[in-house]
Amino acid sequence: MREILMTRAETKDEIIKGLMTTINNLNEEISFLREQVAYLTQKRYGKSSEQTPLSGQTSLFDEENFAGDEDEDLPC
């Protein structure tokens, strides 16, 4: 009977060790996935996703199309 108790105790210890290993692995995976979500969220919605002109001021009109027209309207 003592041998049966030791076997059960060893089995419980093995099960507990296996479960602890599984828990640790899952915690590491969760941590990694959280880091990925944070990185991808920053990449998607961060400052670099909103492009602004180099001058710092946005234009309502396409300046390339109006550049030639402005000179024609000026008095000589």
Image (tube, helix red, strand yellow):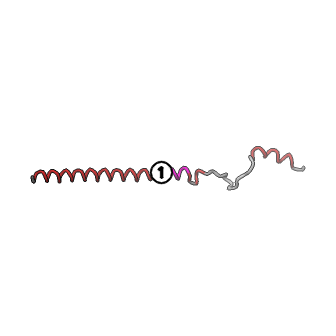
User: Which residue is found at the position 74% from the left and 50% from the top?
Assistant: 60
- Helix, strand or loop status at disc 1: helix
Instruction: Tell whether 62 sits left or right of 15.
Output: right
Answer with left or right where residue 27 lies relative to residue 45. left
Q: Residues within 10 Å of mark 1 (few under 14, many from 20)?
A: few
- Say left or right for 28 vs 3: right
Q: Nearer the viewer, residue 48 or 22?
A: 22
Residue 49: say if magenta. Answer: no
Type of amino acid at the residue the image marks with label 1: Val
* Residue range of the region highlighted in magenta in the rendering: 38-44
Question: Residue drawn 17% across and 52% down?
Answer: 10
Q: Position of residue 53 (x, y in %)?
A: 67, 51
Determine the residue located farthest toward the front in the rendered image: 1
Residue 42 x, y percent position in the rendering? 53, 53
Disc 1 designates what residue?
37
Question: On the rendered structure, is 73 left or right of 29?
Answer: right
Seen at 80% across and 44% down, the residue is 68
